[in-house]
Image: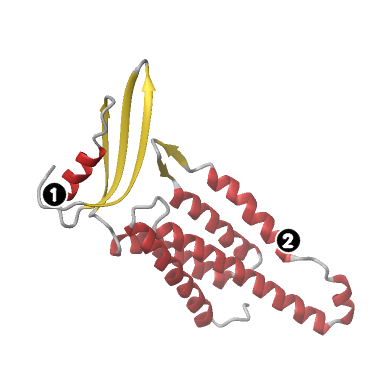
Amino acid sequence: MVTLSYLEIALRLGVAILAGGIVGFEREKKGRDAGFRTHILVAVGTALFALIELETATKLLKLAAADENASQIISFSTHRLTAQVVSGIGFIGAGTIILTKRSIKGLTTAASIWVCAALGMAAGFGYYVIAGAGSLSILLTLVVIKRLFSFPHMKKVRVSYKGLKDYTEIIENELRKNGIKILGVNAKTSLIEGNVSHHLEYHVDTRHLTDEI
């Protein structure tokens, strides 16, 4: 049994979803790779670890209060264990992140792996309510929130051209002329066998698109 009420556990996880979502929403709007769901997953995972620590500390204190001899025996630090798990799972999650052509894929998968470590710890410590509430929070983040808060107008536009002349200003003016708002740009120039190539990747907002380019 957990010391916190079911309502309190749900409230704390809900606040974590809200807090992570606020930051993630702003990042998603700006076309950043770590967006809405990634931030929420990290917030939920952190909340789960905090709940686990709280429950464990409470039970240890009760045990120590009930038996004076137990207080001398109990020297195990759950904080050390949790810290090791968090860093260890972080390495596994990092392996799912793929960096290609200046874009990043796999951040949400990495975050979901990391947050599942919290679920495993909750189950292992016997905090079944925390594990269950956490699972529902993660499912809500990965499935429901994705459908409710999609950003179909957020696009990536990639432009490549060869030559010494810089066409960046012309390209950006053309995008703006068609009602496209530029949120960010990644630029790369390469020299292969004497030929100069320019690669531009724009994060854009197309909700006011006036014409098809």
- Residue 142: horizontal and vertical position, in percent? 39, 59
Q: Nearer the viewer, residue 163 or 181?
A: 163
- Residue 32: horizontal and vertical position, in percent? 38, 52
Q: Are marks 2 and 1 in contact (CB under 8 Å)?
A: no
Q: Which mark is residue 80?
A: 2
Q: If the image is split into quadrants, where does the C terminus sit?
A: top left
Of labels 2 and 1, the one closer to you: 1
- Residue 66: horizontal and vertical position, in percent? 81, 84
- Residue 122: horizontal and vertical position, in percent? 61, 65
* Amino acid type, residue under disc 2 in the picture: Arg
Distance from disc 2 to disc 1, alpha carbons, whole Å, reads 56 Å
| Left or right: residue 128 compared with residue 71 | left
Task: Give the answer, above or below, for where 212 lies relative to 165.
Answer: below
* Amino acid type, residue under disc 1 in the picture: Asn
Identify the image quadrant of residue 146: bottom left
- Dot placed on the residue nearer the N-terminal end, 2 or 1: 2
Residue identifier under label 1: 178
Residue at image x 23%, y 41%? 169
Residue at image x 27%, y 24%? 163
Q: Which mark is residue 133?
A: none
